[in-house]
Amino acid sequence: DAGVIQSPRHEVTEMGQEVTLRCKPISGHDYLFWYRQTMMRGLELLIYFNNNVPIDDSGMPEDRFSAKMPNASFSTLKIQPSEPRDSAVYFCASSLGGTQPQHFGDGTRLSIL
Amino acid sequence: AQSVTQPDIHITVSEGASLELRCNYSYGATPYLFWYVQSPGQGLQLLLKYFSGDTLVQGIKGFEAEFKRSQSSFNLRKPSVHWSDAAEYFCAVGDTGNQFYFGTGTSLTVIP
């Protein structure tokens, strides 16, 4: 079975540019999560969706970050404009709910120069 | 609020030695507990989970964990560590309110 698929795996861009990260959750999973991982702050939950609806976006660092889930099989995380401090690994995960394990993608390693 | 604590930031063990990684949680009801492993450059992979029943749960790669309600702990163990076990390990707790909390992780180094 296909797991959570994220693209791109790596992204290098200059500050000020728009960055779009993509995620395809596991089919049938109704929860989708976006995380950011850095050495300094560890694994941070940015936002999560239930049935394509954003439930908690309190972890989104600022207005430059936005996330959408137009349908059950696709989500995007957008940063506009990007800044060097946004450099991190961004993970997408999906699950069947809080009592069920989350399944992670391989992440997108983002470098903002 | 729920929380997860992994007291050890980094642990070093010799190959073939036993391993125990600590995890403590704070939660009012019976928690749903998980251990994940993250190898360099990869996402988190589920090792094992505890929902109810037998407090000793078996996972993949020879790992096991024991739920101790009295100590609010869910420690991960392995009898004999292999060099390929070097990775970051995360404990997590979930609840029926669809909240999910990760610990800060423990980095494991295995020396020959």
Image (cartoon, rainbow, N blue to C red):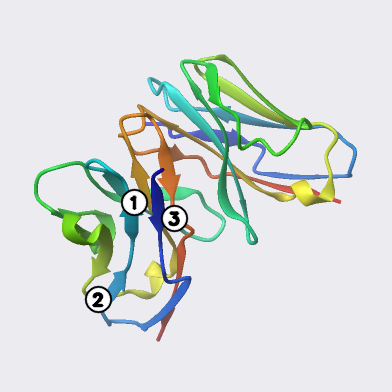
- Residue B110's tag is none
Q: Amino acid at mark 2?
A: Ser
Q: Amino acid at mark 3?
A: Gly
- Residue B80's tag is 2
For the residue labelled by badge 3, is the local secondary structure a helix, a strand or a loop? Answer: loop
- Tags 1 and 2 touching, CB below 8 Å: no
Q: Nearer the viewer, mark 3 or mark 2?
A: 3
Pointer 3 and pointer 2 on the same chain: yes
Position of residue B27 relative to residue A93, above or below, is below
Whole-percent x, y for residue B18 in the image: 25, 78
Q: CA distance from mark 1 to mark 3?
A: 11 Å
Name the residue tied to disc 3: B103
Position of residue A82 relative to residue A31, above or below, is below
Whole-percent x, y for residue A47 in the image: 57, 32
Q: Which of the marked residues, 1 or 2, is nearer the chain's N terminus? A: 1
- Residue B26's tag is 1
Left or right: A20, with B89 as reference point? right
Q: Residue at x 43, y 27 (%)?
A: A26
Pointer 1 and pointer 2 on the same chain: yes
